[in-house]
């Protein structure tokens, strides 16, 4: 359950901390006071998307933090989150002006989707948006499945595994194709393998060719430089001739001392090195005569490699493509046998899936009968005693045609039908139900589903839409009963629900120094009576308003006492 929430810089809330009780917590206040902000804060704690417009105007950052207590720590452990002392965990969601937010549970950073997955085990929230979701046929099937398979999900799990395997087999059959398609595919693969292997591309070859092309494109400049260098070395007045003259001069005095002898040796070594350089230069110059032909060959090879690269990817990708293509070619070569095996497997899976779908349908129909009775009973207590509710199933297809309507959840298409009043025909929920009836229908569903899920905290945002009078008393009783097994938080306008509160919080808005802020005040007994009187609409008008509110509050106290007994 939620023990405490702290809110900082969210919408109109500057700073707020609320301590909740483990039973029925009620929020009331004038329209526009900021009740929706409390709900938004709770939604952020369970994984709702953060919108930067929620940040208080003029601020750069804010946060919402919730302290929870649970005896079910497995969902935390599954995400690698260690629970705190005595099953406590803290959800902290910091948000910023740029739209970014940071989510941590017991200090470990997680994503929004991870938070949503985690908190569905601890909190269930009913808001106005759930009106529309309940009207969707797919959501109605999910509600029935939750009721039927909550205690044993193995039939659904088996169906989904069979469905995945069936889709995999049929996809393999489609990939393999018929004999003609296989032959065409084999021709294509053979051509592609041959094209890559004949090209015989080497790793790093493209880079080397690019470098060589750069050299060849500068051939005339290089040739001119080499020719000039050869002339400077080998010409009549070149370095070779000059060093020969130097050697003759030094040789004539080399016997007059070691220093002159050493210089003579060094000159002769330089002459040998210079002669080798001149030879290399001449060799390079000779090769330049073939540079045009080589450039054409290099450009042609580069074009070939790049064409292959565009078709198959880089060197590594080409090698992988060849390996995969050869593997597929082997499989296709034995295609007739493989296709036959797949056909046999597909036939076996079709039968298993058909049996599984029928099993699911039978379980759903049995569970639907139980759910129908429970919902009718709940609606009767909520002021709809003449309601008729039915889960309408589509006709089960036969074996020859069922594959067209198969899904991971079977082939059932179901829809909730309701007749809320005597004389009205059963019609789809979306076509017949009013706002007030929808509130009560949703509450009935939540009461039943809540008993199954083990959810510790249930939040109801204006469950009383379209409800008043004696029906309001019935709703108040239902919420009170519900809160005896789990924590309930409820935003309401009904005095009957407010009178049943174990903890009552008054939400108000005030302006100070040019800034508007929302505040939440826990009400004591007198404050609760005063708020019940205000919600009744007679405070300040009737002299008996407070006395009536006191009596309504005492009625709530007696009801809670009777529940304990």
Image (cartoon, rainbow, N blue to C red):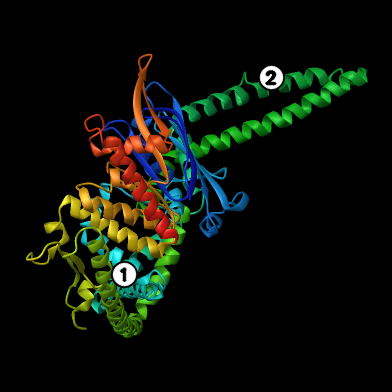
Question: Is the C terminus in the top left, top right, bottom left or bottom right quadrant?
Answer: bottom left
Q: Residues within 10 Å of mark 1 (few under 14, many from 20)?
A: some
Give the mark, 2 or 1, whose residue is nearer the N terminus. 2
- The CA distance from mark 2 to mark 1 is 94 Å
Residue at x-position 21% and y-position 30%: 541
> Which residue has dot 2 on it?
242
Asked whether residue 177 is in view, the answer is: no
**Vertical relation: 129 (above or below) 430:** above
Look at the picture and state if 540 lies above or below 81: above
Query: Residue at the location (50% across, 54% down)?
Result: 202
Q: Secondary structure at mark 2?
A: helix
Q: Position of residue 343 (x, y in %)?
A: 30, 83
Q: Quadrant of residue 228?
A: top right
Q: Residue furthest top?
A: 513
For the point 26% across and 61% down, the residue is 381
Percent x, y of residue 158? 38, 75
- Disc marking residue 408: 1
Q: Position of residue 24 (x, y in %)?
A: 41, 49
């Amino acid at each position: 359950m939620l023990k405490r929430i702290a809110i900082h810089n969210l919408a109109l809330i500057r700073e707020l901390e609320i301590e909740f009780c483990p039973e029925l917590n009620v929020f009331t206040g004038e329209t526009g006071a900021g009740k929706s902000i409390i709900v938004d804060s709770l939604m952020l704690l369970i994984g709702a998307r953060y919108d930067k417009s929620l940040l208080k105007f003029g601020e750069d950052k804010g946060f919402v933090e919730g302290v929870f207590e649970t005896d079910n720590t497995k969902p935390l452990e599954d995400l690698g989150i260690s629970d705190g002392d005595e099953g406590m965990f803290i959800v902290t969601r910091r948000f910023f002006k740029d739209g970014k937010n940071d989510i941590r549970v017991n200090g470990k950073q997680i994503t929004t989707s991870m938070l949503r997955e985690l908190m569905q085990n601890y909190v269930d929230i009913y808001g106005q948006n759930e009106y529309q979701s309940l009207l969707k046929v797919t959501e109605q099937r999910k509600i029935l499945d939750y009721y039927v398979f909550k205690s044993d999900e193995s039939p659904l799990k088996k169906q989904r595994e069979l469905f995945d395997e069936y889709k995999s087999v049929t996809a393999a059959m489609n990939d393999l194709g018929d004999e003609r398609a296989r032959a065409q595919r084999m021709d294509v693969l053979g051509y592609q393998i041959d094209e890559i292997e004949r090209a015989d591309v080497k790793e790093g070859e493209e880079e080397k060719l690019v470098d060589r092309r750069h050299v060849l494109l500068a051939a005339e400049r290089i040739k001119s430089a080499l020719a000039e260098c050869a002339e400077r070395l080998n010409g009549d007045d070149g370095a070779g001739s000059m060093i020969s003259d130097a050697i003759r001069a030094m040789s004539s005095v080399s016997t007059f001392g070691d220093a002159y002898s050493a210089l003579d040796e060094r000159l002769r070594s330089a002459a040998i090195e210079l002669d080798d350089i001149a030879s290399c230069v001449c060799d390079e110059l000779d090769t330049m005569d073939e540079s045009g032909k080589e450039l054409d060959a290099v450009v042609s090879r580069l074009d070939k490699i790049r064409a292959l690269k565009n078709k198959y990817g880089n060197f590594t990708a080409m090698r992988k493509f060849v390996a995969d293509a050869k593997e597929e070619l082997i499989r296709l070569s034995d295609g007739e046998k493989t296709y036959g095996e797949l056909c046999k497997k597909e036939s076996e899976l079709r039968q298993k899936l058909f049996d599984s779908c029928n099993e699911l349908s039978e379980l759903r129909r049995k569970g639907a009968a139980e759910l129908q009775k429970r919902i009718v009973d709940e609606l009767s207590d909520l002021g709809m005693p003449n309601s008729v509710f039915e889960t309408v199933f589509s006709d089960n297809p036969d074996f020859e045609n069922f594959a067209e309507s198969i899904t991971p959840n079977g082939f059932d298409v179901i829809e909730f039908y309701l007749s809320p009043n005597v004389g009205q025909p059963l019609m789809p929920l979306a076509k017949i139900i009013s706002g007030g009836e929808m509130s009560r229908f949703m509450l009935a569903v939540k009461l039943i589903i809540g008993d199954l899920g083990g959810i510790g905290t249930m939040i109801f945002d204006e469950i009383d839409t379209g409800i008043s009078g004696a029906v309001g008393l019935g709703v108040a009783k239902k919420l009170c009963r519900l809160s005896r097994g789990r924590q309930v938080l409820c935003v309401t306008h009904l005095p009957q629900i407010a009178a049943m509160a174990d903890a009552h919080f008054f939400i108000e808005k005030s302006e100070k120094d040019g800034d508007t802020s929302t505040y939440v005040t826990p009400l004591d007994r007198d404050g609760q009576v005063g708020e019940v009187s205000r919600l009744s609409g007679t405070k300040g008008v009737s002299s008996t308003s407070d006395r009536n509110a006191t009596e309504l509050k005492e009625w709530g106290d007696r009801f809670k006492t009777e529940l304990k007994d």
